[in-house]
Amino acid sequence: MAKNYQKAVNEYRKKIQDARSEREALATALLPTEEVTARVDAWIHQKAEQAQRRFKIVGNALARPGGRVEADADPFLVFARGGAKATDLGPIMCALFGEQVRAMVMAGVDLDPDALPMNERPAHLAAIDQQILELEMAEEDTIREAEAAGVYIERRPDASPDAILRPAWPETAEA
């Protein structure tokens, strides 16, 4: 009984597509709650430092005789004269109400309790990349076997050159 080469290649292509989808899902997946919280806290801290610099300018100006706060240094000014320049209220909100800002940001995140930590992702992504390469090499082997049997199967335009050409890369670089 003749082997159905096209069916075998299609099965490999389905597995390749599934592995690529898995890779994309992992690469863009939400981070664990602890990492999301740390990133939110770092953002709030950065914003609060911006406000702290402005408050320092205000304090130093008011600490001098006759000192006054210039409009561009006033952290509470929402619009400068003429209404053309808007002021970012984020820094002052983060400085004064950091916990509330954090709670609001975190409330808007769909957290995944099973999320893979960022530092573990490269190894998992590399394993998926290796799986994809092995599937593509098996697909190429089937295409070559089909060609030897007189059956022509078109290669995918996005097939990995490494799977088709199989270059022999040295394990270590020569010094």
Image (cartoon, rainbow, N blue to C red):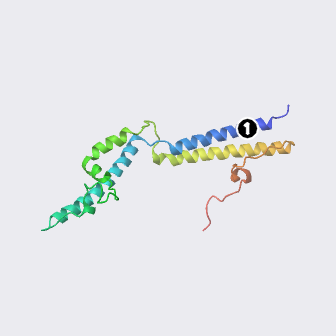
Residue marked by disc 1: 10
Q: Position of residue 45 (x, y in %)?
A: 31, 52
Location of the C terminus by quadrant is: bottom right
Q: Residue at coordinates 28% horizontally, 42% vertically from top-left?
A: 100
Q: Residue furthest front?
A: 82
Q: Residue furthest top?
A: 1
Q: Position of residue 165 (x, y in %)?
A: 73, 54
Q: What secondary structure is found at the residue carrying circle 1? A: helix
Quarter residue 152 falls in: top right
Q: Position of residue 89 (x, y in %)?
A: 31, 52
Front-most of residues 127 and 44: 44
Q: Residue at coordinates 26% horizontally, 56% vertically from top-left?
A: 77
> Residue 148 vs residue 17: left or right?
right
Quarter residue 150 falls in: top right
Q: Residue at coordinates 52% horizontally, 49% vertically from top-left?
A: 122
Three-letter amino acid code of the residue under disc 1: Asn
Q: Position of residue 93 (x, y in %)?
A: 28, 49
Q: Residue at coordinates 54% horizontally, 41% vertically from top-left?
A: 25
How many numbered discs sit on the rendered protein? Answer: 1
Q: Residue furthest right?
A: 150
Location of the N terminus by quadrant is: top right
> Residue 22 vs residue 109: left or right?
right
Quarter residue 14 falls in: top right
Badge 1, how many Cα within 10 Å: few under 14, some, many 20+? few
